[in-house]
């Protein structure tokens, strides 16, 4: 992508010339405070926006919310976004290979997990191709992230469809708060090389501009049997952000271009039946521009208008896609007396695509498609008893061309008996809109060997069956009815906990109905096709229930030592065995995390991160395979000789040389294990 290479060259040149610039003396230019040095009272006063689309103190939110800060990410040693998301309680991240991940909240994981809404500064990152996220194409530079707000539980009344089990809102730093210049370099055995550069300029007293660029390459891992896999990962990108604030108006304009390439291989199902193993490279070219304007009028009402345009060109081997997306949303926030805080808004999203299948793996019905999404939401935060009881009522109405009018209500009750404790209960309904693939794609799976009794034959004959799964225009919206409970408390200045419980009921889950008639394939007499239907229009509805408990704790043992721990347990009751959901795999019942952040001296940092995930099962692969439980530990040792330089040595997955975390489904790839890795990082701020 020539534009990416050109912008990267420009940014690197600017960053190199900024080495002599002195550190800022103003408050805006000062380095961000060390999040590990904040007291627990200060941590509870962190402002979040993802629960109600307006600023709230974390301690006053009636939801299970966790904030991952830039300091958290830096000290974790994470090298990409999925690794950073492991920092939040209740978020399950499983690595398929060196370039693919499963990310889910409260179950329903897998390669094509689709019950999680992911946003970057209000821009949706999910692909309408399957209503999920291609994480290998979302390599947002971690250096540009200010914080990640993670809401565990439905957020559809505010954010709309697909915010079923949770919302991940990635918020990037403003140009005004960015360092004048930054240069970060990493190199190791798996992360072969990573280079990030940025430059921030004050173009006017009230206007700041930041430009940045990043290039990264991850080497292939080893498949089972020590054969070299094909899971290399390369990303190149450049972006900018312009922030302006004057009187009662703020304006933001940002954008980026990105080129990503990720290797993979489709394995052979049955010798002589399926094509030979196909090595291919998935690629994506993405460009977007986003603008946001906010105005505070004389009556104290806040008006916000945001719009973005995005162009993507995607090739995932079995299909390719070109897509244009235009999104416009207006939002208003106002007070009605002393008891009501009202937020409402309306939006329109237009998407135009061109999708092509890659025979014989997939076929597309209707190469071109255009869709519209109209939405209207309102939410009222009602103070029942000042500083004690708060009731939040809201709902969102949406109409998508793939579904009927969707009503997604929400009610939250918050009780704060004192400044240290808060308890909440919430009931909500959320929906997932059918995807392009579920309506129009016919996918071929690897052949399976079976035995069948032909009429007149003396006994069963071995045959090969090739399943063909076909989407349906009758596919309807999946629905969730949710109950959430929580208790957040600060026991003293050094110790706080959060307990969250939930019970969810899912209706109209996606399922595959096997066909009953074999069709000769024309390949060989013993090879047949088995058409199957992808649908959720079952009677009775394809239903599942999920119940879980999540506990997290934060303990400042000493001024120089902090411990953070979380434990979650979940039980998923699936539909009848004859019609299971394909999302039953990759959902562990138990997860545990323990992080230790220690400062032996003012210039040294020693971070240790221990994780455990219980066993999970596959669904599509026959026979079913059980992925064993595994432990992992990461370690980071950093030296800061001064405020502008940091050198770090990071080791990941140090417990064992390699371990299996999950298996790619439903299209099989070589089994790859997560390997032990080490890398060095140097970070310079000017």
Image (spheres, rainbow, N blue to C red):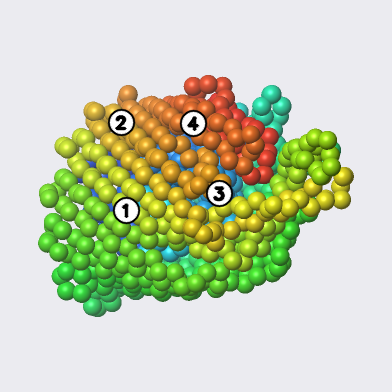
Residue 206 in sight from this viewpoint: no
Mark nearest the camera among 4 and 2 is 4
Name the residue nearer the viewer: 60 or 435: 435
Mark closest to the chain's N terminus, 1 or 4:
1
The residue beneath circle 3 is 579
How much space separates mark 4 and mark 2, taking CA atoms?
A: 26 Å
**Label 3: element kind:** loop
How much space separates mark 1 and mark 4, taking CA atoms?
A: 26 Å
**Label 1: element kind:** strand
Q: Mark on residue 615?
A: 4
Residue 620 place in picture, x, y as percent: 62, 42
The residue beneath circle 1 is 483
Mark closest to the chain's N terminus, 2 or 1:
1
Residue at (42% x, 36% y) in the render: 589
Residue 265 in sight from this viewpoint: yes
Q: Would you identify the image quadrant in which residue 219 lies?
A: top right
How much space separates mark 3 and mark 4, taking CA atoms?
A: 22 Å
The residue beneath circle 2 is 563
Residue 435 place in picture, x, y as percent: 58, 61
**Label 4: element kind:** loop
Q: Would you identify the image quadrant in which residue 193 lies?
A: top right
Mark nearest the camera among 2 and 3 is 3
Q: Is residue 274 above or below residue 176?
A: above
């Amino acid at each position: 992508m020539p534009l990416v290479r050109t912008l990267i060259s420009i940014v690197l040149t600017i960053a190199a010339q900024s080495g002599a610039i002195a550190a800022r003396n103003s408050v805006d230019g000062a380095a961000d405070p060390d999040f590990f040095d904040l007291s627990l009272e200060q941590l509870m006063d962190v402002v979040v926006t993802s629960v109600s689309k307006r600023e709230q103190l974390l301690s006053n939110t009636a939801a299970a919310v966790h904030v991952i800060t830039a300091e958290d990410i830096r000290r974790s040693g994470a090298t990409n976004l999925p690794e950073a998301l492991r920092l939040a309680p209740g978020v399950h991240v499983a690595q398929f290979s060196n370039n693919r991940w499963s990310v889910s909240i409260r179950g329903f994981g897998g390669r094509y997990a689709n019950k999680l809404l992911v946003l970057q500064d209000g821009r949706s990152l999910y692909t309408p191709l399957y209503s999920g996220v291609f994480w290998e194409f979302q390599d947002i530079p971690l250096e540009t992230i200010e914080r990640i707000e993670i809401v565990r539980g439905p957020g559809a009344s505010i954010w709309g469809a697909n915010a079923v089990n949770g919302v991940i809102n990635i918020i990037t730093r403003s140009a005004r708060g960015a360092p004048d210049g930054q240069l970060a370099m990493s190199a190791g055995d798996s992360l072969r090389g990573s280079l990030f550069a940025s430059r921030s300029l004050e173009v006017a007293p009230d206007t700041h501009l930041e430009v940045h660029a990043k290039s990264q390459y991850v080497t292939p891992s080893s498949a089972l049997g020590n054969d070299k896999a094909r899971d290399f990962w390369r990303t190149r990108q450049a972006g900018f952000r312009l922030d302006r604030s004057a009187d009662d108006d703020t304006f933001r304009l940002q954008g980026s271009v990105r080129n990503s390439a990720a290797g993979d291989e489709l394995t052979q199902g049955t010798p002589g039946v399926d094509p030979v193993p196909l090595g291919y490279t998935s690629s994506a070219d993405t460009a977007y521009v986003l603008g946001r304007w906010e105005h505070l009028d004389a009556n104290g009402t806040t008006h916000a208008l945001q719009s973005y345009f995005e162009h993507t060109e995607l090739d995932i081997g079995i299909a390719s896609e070109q897509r244009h997306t235009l999104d416009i949303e207006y939002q208003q926030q106002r007070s009605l007396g002393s008891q009501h805080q009202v937020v409402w808004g309306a939006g329109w999203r237009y998407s135009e695509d061109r999708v092509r299948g890659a025979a014989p793996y997939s076929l597309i019905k209707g190469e071109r498609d255009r869709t519209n999404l109209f939405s209207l939401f309102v939410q009222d935060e009602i103070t029942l008893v000042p500083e004690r009881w708060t009731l939040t009522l809201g709902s969102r109405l949406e109409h998508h061309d793939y579904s009927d009018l969707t009503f997604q209500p929400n009610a939250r009750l918050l009780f704060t008996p004192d400044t240290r404790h808060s308890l909440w209960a919430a009931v909500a309904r959320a929906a997932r809109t059918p995807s392009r693939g579920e309506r129009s794609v016919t996918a071929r799976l690897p052949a399976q060997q079976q035995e069948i009794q032909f009429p007149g034959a003396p006994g069963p004959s071995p045959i090969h069956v090739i399943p063909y799964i076909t989407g349906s225009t009758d596919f309807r919206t999946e629905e969730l009815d949710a109950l959430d409970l929580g208790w957040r408390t600060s026991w003293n200045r050094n110790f706080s906990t959060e307990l969250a419980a939930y019970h969810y009921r899912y209706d109209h889950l996606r399922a595959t109905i096997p066909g009953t008639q074999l069709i000769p394939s024309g390949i060989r007499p013993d090879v047949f096709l088995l058409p199957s239907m992808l649908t959720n229009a079952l009677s009775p509805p394809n239903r599942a229930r999920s119940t879980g408990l999540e506990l997290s704790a934060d303990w400042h043992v000493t001024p120089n030592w902090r411990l953070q721990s979380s434990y979650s347990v979940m039980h998923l009751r699936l539909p009848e065995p004859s019609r299971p959901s394909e999302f039953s795999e990759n959902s562990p019942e138990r997860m545990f995390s323990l992080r230790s952040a220690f400062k032996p001296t003012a210039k040294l940092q020693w971070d240790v991160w221990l994780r455990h995930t219980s066993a999970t099962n596959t669904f599509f692969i026959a026979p079913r395979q059980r992925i064993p439980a595994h432990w992992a530990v990461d370690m980071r040792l950093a030296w800061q000789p001064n405020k502008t330089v940091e050198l770090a040595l990071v080791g990941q997955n140090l417990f064992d040389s390699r371990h299996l975390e999950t298996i790619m489904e439903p299209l099989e790839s070589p089994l790859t294990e997560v390997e032990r890795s080490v890398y060095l990082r140097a970070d310079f701020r000017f």
